[in-house]
Image (tube, rainbow, N blue to C red):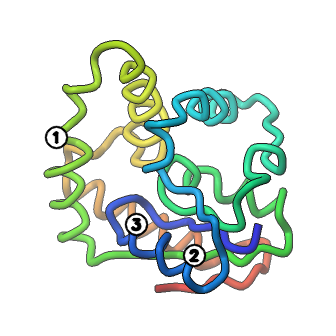
Amino acid sequence: MKIIGAGFGRSGTMSLKSALERLGCGPCYHMKINPVQVRSYAVFMRAWSGKKVNWKRFFRRYNSVVDWPACSFYKDLMKEFPDARVLLNIREPEAWYDSMKETIFAIQPAFHSGSLKVVRKMHDEIIWKGSLKGVFEDRQKLLLFTGKYIEDVTENRSGRQVTGL
């Protein structure tokens, strides 16, 4: 693992994935991979519940990772991959919120049957209740929280170099 993306989804992660792959840091793991690999959600849910996950094995085919659900585990990934750089991609907060509301949040009701139930559960637990602390529908609270998240990643208590975009 060369690059650990700590930035939330809807902050240019698909473009970042493409750029990292063109720059020789690929393949890059991104949430877009998950719908075709629903089994991978079980790994993230296992980690979310506090159980041990073999991140090196899970990401063995990847040199970088961006987007949810992986960004929610950036601290764990930093421990597992001590030589990897942390990349924090951010987007103007108001535009980010609007994009989240119009896309990921808006499609949640569609995830109600079959394998999509697994996607919905992961979204609910790791994104909405987890990364976004259950405050998504309160725009002001969420924007304050995301500002604190950015500060936390940037401070990077382990002393690792953080690269911001």
Question: Mark 3 or mark 1, which is nearer the start of the sequence?
Answer: 3
Q: Residue at x 83, y 59 (%)?
A: 79
Residue 113 horizontal side relative to residue 78, left or right: left
- The x, y position of residue 125, in whole percent, is 46, 31
Q: Residue at x 84, y 75 (%)?
A: 83
Query: Which amino acid, mark 3?
Result: Met
Amino acid beneath label 1: Ala
Q: Is residue 45 left or right of residue 134?
A: right
Q: Name the secondary structure under disc 1.
A: helix
Q: Residue at x 49, y 38 (%)?
A: 126
The residue tagged 2 is 21
Q: Which residue is mark 3?
A: 14
For the N terminus, the image quarter is bottom right
21 or 90, which is in the foreground? 21
Q: Are marks 2 and 1 in contact (CB under 8 Å)?
A: no
Residue 156: x and y in percent read: 68, 74
Q: Disc 1 designates what residue?
A: 106
Residues at discs 1 and 3 in contact (Cβ within 8 Å): no
Point out the residue furthest to the top here. Answer: 114
Q: Provide the secondary structure element on which disc 2 rests.
A: helix
| Distance CA(mark 2)–CA(mark 1) | 29 Å
Dot 2 surroundings within 10 Å: few (below 14), some, or many (20 or more)? some
What distance separates the C-alpha of mark 2 from that of mark 3?
A: 11 Å
Mark nearer the viewer, 2 or 1: 2
Q: CA gap, disc 1 to disc 3?
A: 19 Å
Residue 33 rendering spot, x and y as whole percentages: 49, 47
